Structures are given as structure tokens and as C-alpha cells.
Image (tube, rainbow, N blue to C red):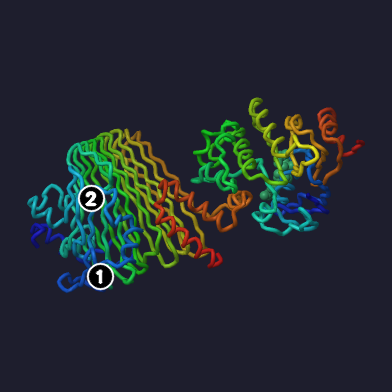
């Protein structure tokens, strides 16, 4: 599904990613751990093609196509989708209108919005004054309608209360087709600090990013407990 | 000089050359004012393109869903009909005849000698509309009016009066437009609006001028106790020069006014516009909200709030979006507190579209152009909810053209 080769990325004149390599096969969900400021969001926004993220070296292959220089919307047409950590507010655009943009198939999403406790927010301006949890539910609704093949979630649970966490976990699992086994096609890359989302995903592989590079990979549940017990420093001398 | 008192005539004569402090000074002699020889098409003679222009200016040609209609072409009345009780709609000249020159209203809000444009309208008055909602009348359908210009280089001198009597509620959709055939023209329009006690007027004005047209609207609104005036102003098409500074006087407790305006300026447009409100009684409220987009044209967005009573609240908001490397947006918000305790605020911002927002929408599948116009539409929608569909099309055309222009 996705191959990243020796990726070096500058943001605002600063070198943030320093030679990132990894691969996500069809049907797999991988988890990305790392300290604040290590470069996780930078990686996701580079993968989707935001222009502030300048690829100075390396390449990104998606479904066998080199997308390193491709415009954002073409990547999306190929099947990429992101739930943003901090989506921008868009004044004057109703959340319902954004949902309609995502909803290419024209499906009826009344029930889905209801399920995400989000019906009341559809007529509000997109992300204008949304609380942290409301923003995340809005992002999940958009992704559910967009139905990408490759799903990137940037801290889908930050700022979300326990009840809504359960909702988001279930929706993420559905999006990623975790309920399917052999026929599962969709893949994902998920950033988490709290690890709550892990309970819903039965994820396949975990990475630890330190200072713009992936320093270790392995069983995500094992990595998460190591980080919890010993901190990120331990991952630098990874033994898994 | 039938319509002016001797004193008014002297004042007007004295102001013939009085320039306005704002906007380009216009040479009135460059335009033709010859009502006796001007060939004006009748309502039925308007060709398909002209009818379409009327539609873009918000005018329903079949009078559907309208309480009344009024159309003036150059100096002549093209159409005037009324379908509901309790609302009078008639040509201004007819109203002056019928009501002994309307001494309570005629030149009572706007000064004859405000500048050379008001003086010109006073001295060379063509016609205009008189609209009155009788006390307590609440119409659900809007009254529509259109001031149309069809001859090359024509000068149109219009004087309108709107009265909403005590407890009445009225909605007016007013368009100003030009025939597709004409390029240059000058529209001078004096409008005097009287909102009586606990009355309410919602007035939507759509400008859809020809590209080389010059226009100088002169509007004053008087709002009495408990009255409400809501103005929506929209201009999405190139116009060579527009200058206006509509002013509202809140003359009684609890008077409320809201000026919303949404303008786009293609290259070659010069707009100097603002709204001014005097709040001189307790509990008066004013909100002036403008959204301006420059596609290479110049926009001066003014606003002036004057708080003269301690218990008033008012807010002014000018936001501008620059979509071209050329062009100008100059936001000039002014607050004037003349009593301790006034609550007045303003917010002004001029910028470009945030790249991050465009890419956010692209991450949901829109192309860059689609994302940009969606954001611009949202930006304008904040001031006026739901731009009429016909104007949406104008905006889309502007967006498409500016994308081609490679900005
Ligand atoms: N536009 C920018 N200009 C300058 N520096 C930036 C910019 N964007 C990101 N950075 C820097 O790049 C580094 C990586 O940021 P990034 O957002 O990728 O971290 P992260 O791993 O997602 O952190 P967190 O866990 O806090 O979300 C940080 O030091 C950040 O300050
Ligand atoms: Mg981050």
C-alpha cells in the first residue's frame, strides 16, 4: 500500500524528518509513537502532500505510484485520507457542507452523524469554536464518508472523553476493516500518545520516532508498555 | 422647480460644485440628461439579456412571490404594480402630487446640499419610488424595485422614499442594473428611509452595474424608538466607481440597525463604501459587518459608529481578502464614544486565503480552485447568509477568471 524511502523533510526552514523508511502492506494497521515535536505530524502531512512540508530527499510510493510531488487532491483520489490533529477553522463553511464534500457517493449520513453524537454540530461553521473532542468526531465523520483505502489518524483520541473514546475506537476499527480478516484491504497509520485507540484495533506493527527518524519497530502493544514503563529513551537503545 | 422650496433651491444651486470628500470627483457634464429625447424601452420591449440582468439584480420579472414591483428605466417608469393591501408603491412624482409634496419626508433626512450629487438630484429630479407600509401591516412577501439604465452615457437622477409606519414590517429587494448594451452611465440616487416606532425594514440591495458605470447613492435612515433596520448590500460585478456612506440615525430608545455588505472588486473597480450609525438613545444597537474581496480592484471599506448615550452597544467588523497581487483593500473603522459607558468595538483584518485551509479542503478531495472558491464563498457568507443563486454564479465566474489569470 505505502512505501516511504529515505524521506528527508524541511518545515519552515527547519530540518524535521531525517531519513524515514518504512512500509505498510495492504490490510495492515501500523502505529506511530514518539515524543512531542519528534516529527509525527510532519510525516503525516508530508504523506498527504501539504505544501509547507518540503521533501528534500527520498520518495513516497502509494499503490506502486510515486506520489512524492503529487497535489493533495490527487493523492486523495488515489485513496489517501487523514484525520487531522488540529484541523483549521473555516469560517462561513458549515460542517454539513464539508461532510457533503467528503460524501462523493451521496450516501445518507443521518444515522452516522447520530451515532457520532454529531447531528447538532452539522449546522455549525467547520471547526469554529469546536472543543477538542468535537473536532475529532467531526474528523471521523468526514473520514467515514470519504472511505479512503489508506487511513491516517493523528491522535484521534486526544481531548476525547471516555464515552466518546469508545465511539471513536469503534468507528476507527470499522474504517480500518479490523472486523474482516482475509478480505481486509484497508491500511492505516495511527499516531497515539495515550494508547487508548490500541484497545480497538488489534494493530499489526508499531514504530517509535525520535528526532525525525524511526528508531525501532515491533509489536505495538509491547512498545507501548515499554514506553509507559521506561520512557522513550529506552526505545533509542531498542532491544525488541 | 415644482418639487423644491425656494430655500432648498438656493441651497442646491450653491452646492452644484461641492465635491464629496470621498471617492473620485465626477464630472457631471460628461453624462447626458435629456429626458425629452431619450428613447426608453418599455417594460415589454426589454430584450432577453436585459431581463436576465434584472433577474441578477434580484428582480422577479413575472412579479411572482412579490408584494409589489417597481421598475424605472433611465428617467421613465417601466412598471409599477401592487398585489397586497397595506403597502403603497408608486412613482415618486405621483406620490408628491397625491400627498402635497410629502413635507414630512421629502428632503427631510438627506440634505439637499450635502454634495454636488444630492444637489444634482434635487435640481434635475427624474423620478424614483415611494414605498409606504401602513401602520401595523406585516407583509410576508417582499416588495421589489429596480433602477435600470439603458442608454449610453445616461445620467439617472433618482429620489426614493421608504416609510415603514408604526408596528409595520416590510422587506424590500432593490436592484440596480444596466443594459448589457451600454457601457458608461452615471446613477445618482437619493434615498430617505423612515422606520417608525417598533417598525422593521429589511432592505436588500443588489448592484449589478455595467463595467464603466459610476454611481453615487446617497442614503439616510431614521430609526425611531424600538425600530429595526437591516441592510444587506451585495455587489459582485465590476463597476468603475462607487462611493457611498449610508448613514443611520437611531432616534429613540432601543433602535437597532445592522448593515451587512458583501463586495467583490475585479480589476478596474473602485469602491469606496462604508456605513455610519449615530446611536443617541439608551439601548440602541448597531452592527456593521463587511466582507470585501479584491480580484485586483480597489476597495476602501469604511465604518463609523458614534455612541452618544451611555447605554448603547455597537460593533464594527471589516474583513478583506486579497486574491490578486494587484488591487487594494483599505479598512478604515472608526469608533467615536461621546458618553461614558458606551460599549463599542471593532475588528478589521485584511489578508489572503490561508494555505492550510485550502489544503484541508483538498485533503477531502476538492481541487485547488474548488477549495479556494469554497473558502471565498464561506468568507462572504459570514456577512450575508445565502447569497442569491444568481449572484453565486457571478462570483464563480470571477473566481474562474482569476484562476485563469494565474495569480
Ligand atoms: N511550520 C513550522 N515552522 C517551524 N517549525 C515547525 C513547523 N511545523 C512544525 N515544526 C517543528 O517541527 C517539529 C516536529 O513537529 P510535529 O508537529 O511533526 O511533531 P509531533 O511529533 O507531531 O508532535 P506532537 O506529539 O506534539 O503532536 C517541532 O519541533 C515543530 O516545532
Ligand atoms: Mg503531532
Lower position in the chain sequence, tag 1 or tag 2: 2
Can residue A100 be seen by looking at this rendering?
yes
Image point (63%, 45%), residue name: A146
Say whether residue B240 is left or right of residue A225.
left
Image point (48%, 50%), residue name: B379
Residue, disc 1 = B154
Residue A80 percent across, percent down from the top left: 70, 49
The disc label shown at residue B68, or none: 2
Nearer to the camera, B379 or B38: B38
Considering the image in quadrants, where does the C terminus of chain A appear?
Answer: top right
Image point (32%, 44%), residue name: B230
Mark 2 nearby-residue class (10 Å; few <14, some 14–19, many ≥20)? many
Q: Which residue lies furthest to the top in this view?
A: A162
> Quick check: is the Cβ at mark 1 less than 8 Å away from ligand 1?
no
Q: Is mark 2 on a helix, strand or loop?
A: strand
Nearer to the camera, B182 or B338: B182
Amino acid at each position: 500500500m505505502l512505501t516511504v524511502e529515505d524521506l528527508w523533510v524541511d518545515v519552515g526552514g527547519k530540518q524535521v524528518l531525517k531519513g524515514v523508511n518504512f512500509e505498510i502492506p495492504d490490510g495492515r494497521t501500523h502505529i506511530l509513537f514518539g515524543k512531542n515535536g519528534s516529527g509525527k505530524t510532519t510525516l503525516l502531512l508530508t504523506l498527504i502532500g501539504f505544501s509547507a512540508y518540503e521533501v528534500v530527499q527520498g520518495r513516497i510510493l502509494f499503490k506502486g505510484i510515486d506520489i512524492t510531488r503529487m497535489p493533495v487532491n490527487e493523492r486523495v483520489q488515489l485513496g489517501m485520507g487523514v484525520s487531522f490533529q488540529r484541523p483549521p477553522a473555516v469560517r462561513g463553511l458549515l460542517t454539513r457542507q464539508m461532510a457533503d464534500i467528503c460524501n462523493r457517493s451521496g450516501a445518507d449520513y443521518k444515522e452516522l452523524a447520530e451515532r457520532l453524537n454529531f447531528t447538532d454540530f452539522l449546522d455549525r461553521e467547520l471547526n469554529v469554536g469546536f472543543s477538542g473532542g468535537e473536532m475529532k468526531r467531526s474528523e471521523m465523520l468526514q473520514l467515514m464518508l470519504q472511505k479512503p483505502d489508506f487511513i491516517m489518524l493523528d491522535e484521534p483520541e486526544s481531548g476525547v472523553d471516555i464515552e466518546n473514546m469508545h465511539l471513536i475506537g469503534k468507528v476507527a476499527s470499522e474504517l480500518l476493516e479490523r472486523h474482516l480478516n482475509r478480505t481486509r484491504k484497508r491500511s492505516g497509520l495511527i499516531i497515539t500518545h495515550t494508547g487508548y485507540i490500541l484497545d480497538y484495533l488489534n494493530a499489526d506493527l508499531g514504530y517509535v520516532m525520535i528526532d525525525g527518524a524511526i528508531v525501532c519497530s515491533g509489536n505495538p502493544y509491547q512498545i507501548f508498555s515499554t514506553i509507559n514503563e521506561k520512557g522513550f529513551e529506552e526505545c533509542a537503545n531498542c532491544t525488541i | 422647480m415644482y418639487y423644491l422650496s425656494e430655500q432648498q433651491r438656493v441651497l442646491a444651486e450653491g452646492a452644484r460644485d461641492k465635491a464629496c470628500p470621498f471617492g473620485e470627483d465626477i464630472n457631471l457634464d460628461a453624462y447626458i440628461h435629456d429626458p425629452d429625447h431619450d428613447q426608453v424601452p418599455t417594460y415589454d420591449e426589454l430584450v432577453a439579456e436585459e431581463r436576465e440582468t434584472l433577474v441578477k439584480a434580484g428582480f422577479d420579472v413575472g412579479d411572482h412571490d412579490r408584494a409589489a414591483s417597481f421598475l424605472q428605466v433611465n428617467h421613465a417608469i417601466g412598471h409599477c404594480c401592487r398585489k397586497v393591501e397595506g403597502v403603497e408603491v408608486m412613482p415618486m412624482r405621483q406620490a408628491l402630487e397625491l400627498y402635497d409634496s410629502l413635507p414630512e419626508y421629502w428632503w427631510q433626512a438627506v440634505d439637499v446640499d450635502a454634495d454636488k450629487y444630492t444637489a444634482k438630484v434635487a435640481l434635475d429630479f427624474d423620478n424614483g419610488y415611494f414605498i409606504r407600509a401602513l401602520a401595523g401591516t406585516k407583509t410576508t412577501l417582499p416588495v421589489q424595485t429596480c433602477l435600470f439604465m439603458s442608454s449610453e452615457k445616461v445620467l439617472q437622477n433618482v429620489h426614493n422614499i421608504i416609510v415603514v409606519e408604526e408596528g409595520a414590517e416590510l422587506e424590500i429587494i432593490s436592484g440596480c442594473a444596466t443594459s448589457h448594451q451600454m457601457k458608461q452611465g452615471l446613477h445618482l440616487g437619493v434615498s430617505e428611509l423612515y422606520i417608525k416606532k417598533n417598525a422593521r425594514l429589511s432592505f436588500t440591495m443588489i448592484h449589478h452595474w455595467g463595467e464603466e458605470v459610476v454611481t453615487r447613492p446617497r442614503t439616510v435612515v431614521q430609526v425611531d424608538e424600538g425600530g429595526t433596520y437591516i441592510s444587506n448590500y451585495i455587489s459582485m460585478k465590476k463597476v468603475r466607481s462607487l462611493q457611498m456612506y449610508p448613514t443611520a440615525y437611531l432616534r429613540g430608545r432601543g433602535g437597532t440597525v445592522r448593515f451587512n455588505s458583501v463586495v467583490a472588486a475585479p480589476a478596474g473597480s473602485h469602491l469606496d463604501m462604508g456605513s455610519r450609525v449615530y446611536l443617541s438613545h439608551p439601548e440602541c444597537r448597531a452592527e456593521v459587518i463587511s466582507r470585501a474581496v479584491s480580484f485586483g480592484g480597489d476597495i476602501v471599506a469604511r465604518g463609523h459608529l458614534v455612541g452618544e448615550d451611555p447605554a448603547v452597544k455597537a460593533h464594527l467588523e471589516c474583513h478583506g481578502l486579497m486574491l490578486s497581487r494587484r488591487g487594494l483593500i483599505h479598512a478604515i473603522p472608526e469608533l467615536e464614544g461621546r458618553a461614558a459607558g458606551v460599549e463599542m468595538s471593532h475588528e478589521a483584518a485584511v489578508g489572503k486565503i490561508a494555505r492550510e485551509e485550502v489544503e484541508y479542503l483538498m485533503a477531502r478531495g476538492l481541487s485547488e480552485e474548488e477549495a479556494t472558491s469554497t473558502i471565498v464563498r464561506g468568507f462572504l457568507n459570514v456577512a450575508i447568509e445565502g447569497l442569491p443563486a444568481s449572484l453565486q454564479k457571478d462570483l464563480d465566474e470571477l473566481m474562474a477568471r482569476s484562476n485563469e489569470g494565474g495569480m
